[in-house]
Image: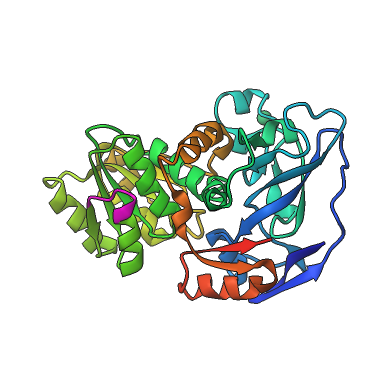
Amino acid sequence: MRGVMMHAPGDIRVEQRADPEIVAPTDAVIRLSATCVCGSDLWPYRGIEPVEGPSPMGHEYVGVVEETGSEVTSVRPGQFVIGSFFASDNTCEICRSGYQSSCVRRELMGLYGAQAERLRVPLADGTLVATPEVPPDDLVPAYLAASDVLGTGWFGALAAQAGPGKTVAVVGDGAVGLLAVLAARQLGAERVVAMSRHEPRQKLALEFGATDIVTERGDEGVERIKELTGGLGAHSVVEAVGTQESMLQAIRSTRPGGHVGYVGVAHGVALDGQELFFSHVHLHGGPAPVRAYLPELIGLIRNRTIDPGKVFDLTLPLDEAAEAYRAMDERRAIKALLRV
Ligand SMILES: [Zn+2]
């Protein structure tokens, strides 16, 4: 089969790889319908995370089950399935408490490389959720978004306690930030402030339900949020970038007693204890337990209540993965879908 490999920062190649096979009796092998490039794939692409030799890439996937191991009971060949970036058993104590992305048996799907024609999925019963029928083609991008960016934005909004009567600010206008806007509105937030200075992303934020746009960032962005909230700060802030500047912008935009949901993978973030102490904010975040939300998100997509697939503003064949990475790196695309 063909699959995407990163050889070094900036060096993306589509190569022939061994076809995945059932290894454990709890595995499934799926044929991908579509996959995509993640903002977090750009960390190694830009050399901010090390690349240790040629590595398979990709952790977002939807597709049709081709084969299952002898112990798999919840999915069967022919079904259209969605999984998230961590495989999880969905039965351990941590999973049952709603933190499948910290499952005691978790496996990072990026190691298997979902930017490919086929994918082995461990712990298939716990990891994969089947849709009620094979969806029409126009719903595939939305389901693919549920595999990571929608579920991550959803967790960010939940962790920030977005809900009725709340003003929610979202730091970051990548796919996760934009979908946190959508999630906050779905969860009933009264006012959703998208922080973005890029016109096409502002437009999408408004389509997803943002009520206000703030173009300033850093301390000026914090001041704008305070101005919009009677000097208090937002009740809820989603941090969807992962840098020192974005984390401080999120904490400082939150009112005392408010909540920050941080879902940008932190790189070089260091917090001052005393500032944190006197901020009086709740901090919660980490890798999103997307698996927990898949059944609900599938329902919202299937009945066309939400269309998170709009974050894909570039579609290319798998063979043109290198261009998909370039377009995202240069911010010419919000998120690139790869047709398989
Ligand atoms: Zn578990």
Main SS class of the magenta portion in the image: loop
Ligand 1 sits in which quadrant? Answer: top right
Q: Residue at x 13, y 53 (%)?
A: 227
Q: Is residue 194 left or right of residue 263?
A: left
The residue segment tinted magenta is 206-211
Image vertical order of residue 51 relative to residue 75, above or below? below
Task: Give how far across and how far down residue 29 sits, in percent.
Answer: 79, 45
Q: Residue at x 74, y 71 (%)?
A: 14
Q: Residue at x 59, y 43 (%)?
A: 135
Image vertical order of residue 11 relative to residue 161, above or below? below
Q: Is residue 239 left or right of residue 135?
A: left
Task: Give how far across and how far down residue 189 sits, in percent.
Answer: 27, 38
Residue 303 in view, yes or no: yes
- Of the pair 278 and 234, the residue shown nearer to us: 234
Quadrant assignment, res 291? top right
Residue 249 in view, yes or no: no
- Of the pair 323 and 97, the residue shown nearer to us: 323
